Image (cartoon, grey):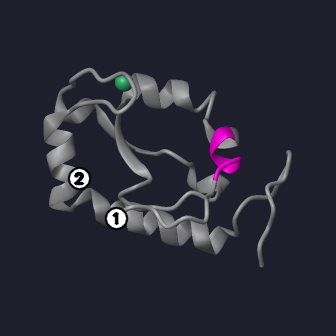
Amino acid sequence: MARERAGKGDSGPDPATVKREKEKARQLRSTSWWQALVQKGVCHYCGKTFAAEEITMDHVVPLSRGGRSTKGNIVPACKECNTKKKHATPVDMILSGDLNKPLDL
Ligand SMILES: [Zn+2]
C-alpha cells in the first residue's frame, strides 16, 4: 500500500511499526558504530564537538513521520539541536524527494 504524502493531519505509520523501529534504535545504541559517533561527539547539525553525555540519538526523519532506525537515518545531535529540530523538521523537504530509496547502510 503506497500511501502518498499527505498534506497534513496524517495519522502516521502504524504503532507496531514505530515500536519496532524504536527497538531497533535501542539496539543501534549499543553498536560500535554508534559508540564511535558518541565518542567523537560531533553534532550532525551544528558541527560542534560535545562530551559523550551531551550527544543524543536523532532520527533525521522522525519515526512518527515514517522514518526508520537505520544508520542512514540516525545521526548524533547535541541536546540543543535535538530540541530545536523538534520545532522544524526537514520532513517536507524529504517527502518531496524519494523516501522509498533504500538508505545507504
Ligand atoms: Zn548541535
Is 21 on the left or on the right of 39, as rendered? right
Q: Position of residue 15 (x, y in %)?
A: 66, 68
Give the magenta range: 93-97
**Residue bearing mark 1:** 105
Quarter of the figure with the C terminus: bottom left
Q: Amino acid at mark 2?
A: Trp
Give the foreground label among 2 and 1: 1
**Residue bearing mark 2:** 34
Q: How many marks?
A: 2
In the displayed structure, 37 sits above or below 12; it is above
Is 6 on the left or on the right of 53, as rendered? right
| Image point (54%, 30%), residue name | 85
| Image point (86%, 46%), residue name | 7
- Helix, strand or loop for disc 1: loop
The prevailing secondary structure element of the residues shown in magenta is helix
- Helix, strand or loop for disc 2: helix
Q: Earlier in the sequence, mark 2 or mark 1?
A: 2
Q: Nearer the viewer, residue 44 or 21?
A: 44
Does the magenta-highlighted stretch encompass residue 52?
no
Task: Compute the Cα span from label 2 to label 1.
Answer: 13 Å
Q: Position of residue 41 (x, y in %)?
A: 20, 33
